[in-house]
Image (tube, rainbow, N blue to C red):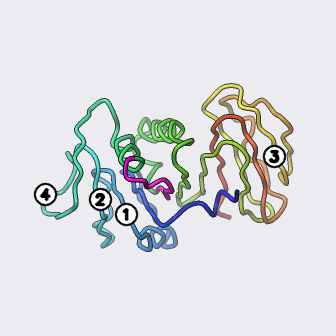
Amino acid sequence: MNQNDTIKEVALVVNGEFPKKPSIIEKIKESKVIIATDGAANLLSEYGINPHYVIGDLDSINDENDYNMIEISDQSKTDLEKALDWCIDNNYLNLSIFGMSGKSEDHFLGNFFTINEFVENINFVIYTDYSTITPCVGKNEFDSFFGQTVSLITLQNNSIVSSENLEYALDSYELVPSSRAIRNKSLGKSFTIECSEPLMVFQSKE
């Protein structure tokens, strides 16, 4: 499976740092379905983008905006968790995610832990101004280019990782939460990662 080919035109916009690059904003605009978590709808409106659904406890929405709002008041879950639960219930299982990083550092890190919990149920690609981040498990092939910076980060202990077509090859390498597998390089137009546990594959834009 080529992981980059699995993502359909469904955008989930989180209330983090909104992308600045026009190409990333255009990806949101071109999506057939746009879902926003709570206050992210306000960010979208600044760019003339109207989400199809707004999900969360809705405590950050500007009253003057008329959205299709889905209120989920469970305070034991973040708005991102609520949105992902709703996506599974409504069969939105291939998501492009925007606004994951930036702003509050605890939310930024917490978002990645949340995504990690859903890796086996939803296909994700996360877009930022600096990287494309793909959570994955099992064997996946990634489109790339020669010299692209590739970093692998796991949030779980004892993930066994192997790679093909990276400068520093991994052969059944036991990866733990650390910086041990960051700043690798792609050797061509694609590379393959096989991992026993979920991990995040970071690919640089340039």
Q: Of the numbered discs in the image, which one, if any, rests on residue 34?
A: 1
Of tags 3 and 4, the one toward the viewer is: 3
**Residue 32 placement, left or right of 152:** left
Displayed quadrant of residue 18: bottom left
Which kind of residue does numbered mark 1 sit on?
Answer: Ile
Sequence-wise, the earlier of marks 1 and 2 is 1
Spatial separation of the CA atoms under disc 4 and disc 2: 15 Å
Q: Was residue 124 drawn as part of the magenta stretch in this picture?
A: no
* Residue 193, image x, y percentages: 75, 47
In the rendered image, residue 93 lying in the magenta stretch gets the answer yes
Give how far apart the Cα atoms at labels 3 and 1 are. Answer: 34 Å
The residue that appears at 22% across and 38% down in the rendered structure is 73
Q: Which amino acid does label 2 sit on?
A: Tyr
Residue range corresponding to the magenta coloring: 89-97
User: Helix or strand or loop: what does disc 1 sit on?
Assistant: strand
Which residue is disc 3 drawn over? 163
Residue pushed farthest left? Answer: 64
**Horizontal side of residue 194 vs 60, given as left or right:** right
Mark 4 closeness class: few <14, some 14–19, many ≥20 residues within 10 Å: few
Q: Name the residue under label 4.
A: 63
Mark earlier in primary sequence (1, 4): 1
Q: Residue 204's spot in the image, x, y percent?
A: 66, 57
Q: Name the residue under label 2.
A: 53
Q: Is residue 62 above or below residue 119?
A: below
Verify CB contact (< 8 Å) between mark 2 and mark 3: no
Give yes or no for contact between labels 1 and 2 (Cβ–Cβ under 8 Å). yes
Cα distance in 3D space between marks 3 and 4 = 50 Å
Mark 1 → mark 4, Cα distance in angstroms = 19 Å
- Where 158 sits versus 134, above or below? above
Amino acid type indicated by mark 3: Ser
Q: Residue at point 37% right, 63% down?
A: 34
